[in-house]
Amino acid sequence: MWELSVIGNLAIALPYFAISYFVARGLIKSGQLVSNPLALGTGLIFFSCGMGHLLHAEHMAFGGEQYRAAADMHMTLWDASTAAIAIWYLSMRRRYVQLLHSPAMFEDHTRVAAEAAARHAAEHDPLTGLLNRQALTGGVEIALDPQVNSGTCGVLFADLDGFKAVNDRFGHITGDALLIAAAERLRRATRPDDLLARLGGDEFVIFLGGPCTEETAVAIAKRCAELLRAPFNVADELVTLSSSIGIALAQPGEMTASELLHCADLAMYEAKSRGPGRHSLGLTHIPLSRVSETATAGAVRSATFA
C-alpha cells in the first residue's frame, strides 16, 4: 500500500506548490515581495506543506520497510507543525481575509504597466521621446533651488534653421523623421547629468546639469551645432541644416526656471536675427520683468559657430 501513499502525497504536494508559486508570482509582479509580509508568509506556509508531502513520498518510495513507519510519523509531525504555524499566523492577522481579497495582494501587472506608461507619456514628447516642457521646467526648478544645488546652471535653447522649408517641401512625415534624427544627434552631445527636451516644433532645450561655466556651455553649444550641421538623409536626398542656439546661465536662487528658459529663448532669437548658424549668450541675474527690455537694448553677445 506504500505505493498509494507515494502517489497520494505527490498529488497533495502539487496544489501546495502551485498555490505558493502563484502567491510569489503575484507579489513579484506587484512589487510587494518585501512590503507584504502577510502574503509572503502565506506562500511560505503552502510551500512548506508541499515540501513535507514531497519528502514523505520520497521516504516512502526509497526508505525501505523499516523507514516507512517512521516516515508516516514524520509526516504527521510535519503537518501538525505546519498547521500550528498557520493557525498562529492567521490568528495574529485580523485583516487576513480582507488582504486575501484585496487587489493589492495580486496587483494586476497590466494596470501597473499602464500607470507607468501614463506617467511616461505625461513627461515626454510623443514624437522624439525627449522630455516635454513640463518635465523640463520641473527639473530646472529643482536645480535652481539653493538648498539642492550651489553651482551655476546653464540652458541651451536650440532652433533648427531652415526646418520649415524642409517640412513644407517634403511633408510632415518627413519633417517628423528629421526631428527624430535631430533629437538623436543632440542626445550624443549631452552629458549624463544634462536634461534634453523638445518644447515643440523644431525647438530643443538642453539643461546643463552640474556646475557649468560659460566656456562649458559654449563648447556644448558648438558640439550640438556641429552634429546638427552634418547632412540628413531626407527622402533619399541629403539635407543640410544649421542651428541657432541661445545660452543662458544663472546661479541657484537668482532666477526661476521660467525666467532662465525665457532668457535662453531670447538669446536664441537674437542669434537667429544675426543670421543662421550662430549662438548668443543671453543675460542672467535679471528678473523676468526686465529680461525683454534689456535684451532688446542689445545686451546679448552673439557669435558664429567656427
Image: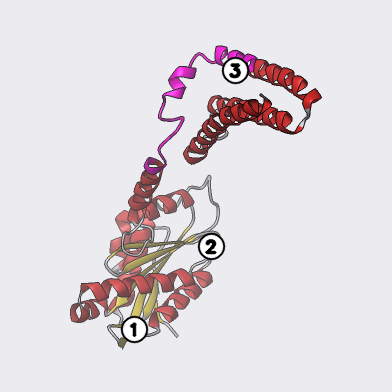
Quadrant (top left/top right/bottom left/bottom right) for the C terminus: bottom left
Residue 192: which disc? 2
First of labels 1, 3 by sequence position: 3
Quadrant (top left/top right/bottom left/bottom right) for the N terminus: top right
Label 1 or label 3, whichever lies nearer to me, is 3
Quarter occupied by residue 291: bottom left
Q: Residue at x 18, y 78 (%)?
A: 168
Eyeballing the image, is 155 above or below 234? above
Q: Residue at label 1?
A: 233
Determine whether the residue tagged by mark 2 lies in a helix, strand or loop: loop
Q: Which residues are magenta?
A: 83-111
Q: How is the image coloured?
A: secondary structure
CA separation, marks 3 and 2?
A: 51 Å
Q: Residue at x 31, y 75 (%)?
A: 178
| 284, 17: nearer the viewer | 17
The disc labelled 1 sits on which kind of residue?
Answer: Asn
